[in-house]
Image: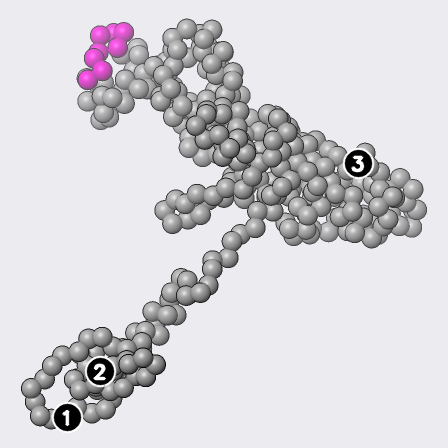
């Protein structure tokens, strides 16, 4: 790359050839008549550093991470979940989302899915590994397998294939509230075990696992299998704070005084104190981690909580 920084000089001393600026004419580069502001060797070194540290060279494309479950995920309506991505602070976040979120952007779809791709791939991969490594799975998959073959088949099932291999053995996953149904690909399983497809029991290709989608503050967590209940600590803490603040208001303390004493904005006091009127059964559910998926602190504050307990139950049961 030619050095564009040149400076005129009135001296009659001719600069050395290496210190002259370069001038491009069509396909030729020749020495100019002026001394370069930046030494050519230094200029070339900087260009090499910039080229080496460039995140993306000309004529190249960033490698796109393959979504390993693309085309295999379906929701309870039978609609396919499609790959999607967003960027946050320079980091790419991958998701599987319900197709209706893209097909009809103007409508509200409270039942639509938006699942973090890496969590979903990792957990479904683990479910498949657990399934294949279960005791006695060889005889379940191959009812007519001989005693001599059982140990060899079990060893293949106990092996830990990489994520791609495990998910390649999945034909279809149907997700609904509370469970996921996984349909294994008989051809892939037969290739893994090196047996004929006809030898595999088709009934063993389908299995179900409990599935929960839980929020902890702004963080979304996917839980497959039997997972112990876990309370949303942020929501629990703010409900306790709301009950304390409401008691202070009843005793005659103003929201402004509470805000000053708690060193928090007055608006925050108004937003949080309403949590104190949550229905008792919903309070118990929150304490035990059994509240509806969408019942988060952020949702309760932004949506405005109904004062009527029956209305609360009806509204939040649909989350």
Looking at the image, is mark 1 or mark 2 earlier in the sequence? 1
Disc assigned to residue 14 = 1
Q: Report x, y in % for residue 99.
A: 54, 34
Q: Which mark is residue 204?
A: 3
Looking at the picture, does residue 97 appear above or below residue 5? above
Residue 235: give x, y in percent of width and height.
Answer: 41, 24
Label 2 neighbour load within 10 Å: few <14, some 14-19, many 20+: many
Extreme residue in the left direction: 10
Give the left or right position of residue 270, taking residue 289 as reference. left
Q: Are marks 3 and 1 in contact (CB under 8 Å)?
A: no
Query: In front: 64, or 199?
Result: 64
Please give the name of the residue rendered at 60% of the width and 40% of the height, measured from the top-left corner.
123
- Between 201 and 239, the one lying in front of the other is 201
Q: Residues within 10 Å of mark 1 (few under 14, many from 20)?
A: few
Classify residue 31 as left or right of residue 199: left
Return the residue at label 2. 21
Say whether residue 54 is left or right of residue 197: left
User: Is 127 above or below relative to 227?
Assistant: below
Badge 1 vs badge 2, beta-carbon distance below 8 Å: no
In the displayed image of the protein, which residue is found farthest to the front? 26
Residue at image position (86%, 48%) is 196
Question: Considering only order in the chain, which callout, 2 or 3, is on the residue closer to the N terminus?
Answer: 2
Residue found 29% across the figure and 15% down from its top: 245
Residue 182 lies in the magenta-colored region: no
């Amino acid at each position: 790359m030619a050095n564009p920084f040149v400076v005129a000089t009135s001296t009659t001393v001719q600069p050395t050839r290496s210190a002259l600026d370069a001038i491009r004419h069509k396909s030729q580069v020749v020495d100019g008549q002026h001394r370069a502001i930046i030494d050519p060797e230094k200029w070339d070194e900087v260009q090499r550093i910039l080229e080496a540290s460039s995140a993306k060279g000309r004529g190249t494309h960033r490698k796109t991470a393959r979504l390993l479950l693309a085309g295999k995920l379906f929701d309870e309506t039978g609609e396919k979940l499609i790959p999607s991505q967003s960027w946050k602070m320079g980091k790419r976040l991958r998701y599987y989302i319900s197709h209706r979120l893209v097909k009809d952007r103007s409508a509200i779809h409270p039942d639509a899915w938006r699942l973090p791709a890496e969590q979903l791939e990792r957990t479904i991969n683990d479910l498949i590994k657990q399934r294949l490594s279960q005791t006695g799975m060889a005889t379940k998959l191959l009812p007519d397998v001989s005693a001599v073959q059982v140990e060899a088949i079990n060893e293949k099932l106990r092996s830990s294939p990489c994520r791609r291999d495990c998910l390649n053995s999945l034909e279809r996953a149907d997700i609904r509230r509370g469970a996921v149904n996984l349909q294994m690909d008989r051809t892939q399983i037969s290739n893994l075990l090196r047996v004929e497809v006809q030898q595999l029991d088709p009934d063993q290709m389908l299995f179900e696992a409990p599935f929960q989608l839980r929020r902890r503050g702004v963080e979304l967590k996917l839980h497959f299998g039997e997972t112990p209940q876990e309370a949303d600590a942020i929501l629990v803490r703010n409900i306790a704070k709301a009950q304390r603040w409401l008691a202070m208001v009843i005793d005659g303390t103003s929201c402004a005084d509470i805000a000053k004493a708690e060193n928090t904005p007055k608006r925050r006091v108004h937003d949080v104190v309403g949590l104190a009127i949550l229905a008792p059964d919903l309070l118990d559910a929150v304490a035990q981690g059994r509240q509806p998926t969408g019942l988060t602190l952020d949702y309760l504050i932004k949506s405005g909580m109904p004062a009527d307990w029956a209305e609360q139950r009806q509204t939040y049961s649909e989350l």
